[in-house]
Amino acid sequence: MNKLFSDTLKMSFVANQVIGLRLMKIATGGAHGKHESDLMVSEKLEAAAEASLAAAMSMATGQPHRAAERALAVYTKRVNGNLTRLSKR
């Protein structure tokens, strides 16, 4: 449980960076801001579906204790990817 807590905490710090970068991009307006808004919404829906599937697969394979860890891994991968993408610009 301590690892899950520390992984969640790390991801939350990175997520805050992503939120800041996204808000700056959206605040500039125009096509790029609109695209970022649209991307943000679609990514959230996709991540939620993927995380739910990962958790369900843990349950279905007899590993319910890994459901939260696997769901968090989905979000962590996406948040880290967004940080990389948004930091380049």
Image (spheres, grey):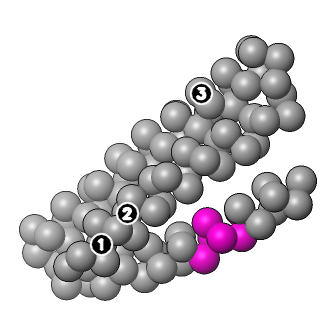
The local crowd at label 3, few if under 14, some if 14 to 19, many if 20 or more residues have their Cα within 10 Å, is: some
Q: Which residues are magenta?
A: 8-13
Q: Secondary structure at mark 1?
A: helix
* Nearer-N-terminus badge (2/3): 3
**Is disc 2 in contact with disc 1, using a CB cutoff of under 8 Å?**
yes
Q: Secondary structure at mark 2?
A: helix
Q: In this orientation, does residue 26 appear? A: no
Callout 2, which amino acid? Asn
User: In the image, 7: left or right of 33?
Assistant: right
Quarter of the rendering containing residue 66 = top right
> Distance of mark 2 from mark 3, alpha carbons?
21 Å
Quarter of the rendering containing residue 60 = top right
Pinpoint residue 14: horizontal percent, then vertical percent: 54, 73
* Nearer-N-terminus badge (3/1): 3
User: In the image, 55: left or right of 79?
Assistant: right
Instruction: Give me the residue at 20% from left, 72% from top.
Output: 33
Residue sitting nearer the eye, 47 or 11: 11
Q: Residue furthest left?
A: 31
Rendered position, 53 above or below 5: above
Callout 1, which amino acid? Leu
Callout 3, which amino acid? Leu
The local crowd at label 2, few if under 14, some if 14 to 19, many if 20 or more residues have their Cα within 10 Å, is: many
| Residue 9 lies in the magenta-colored region | yes
Instruction: Give me the residue at 14% from left, 70% from top.
Output: 32
Residue sitting nearer the eye, 84 or 20: 84
Residue 86 is labelled as 1
Residue 53 is labelled as 3
Pinpoint residue 83: horizontal percent, then vertical percent: 39, 70
Residue 55 is labelled as none
**Is disc 3 in contact with disc 1, using a CB cutoff of under 8 Å?**
no
> Distance of mark 2 from mark 1, alpha carbons?
6 Å
Residue 82 is labelled as 2
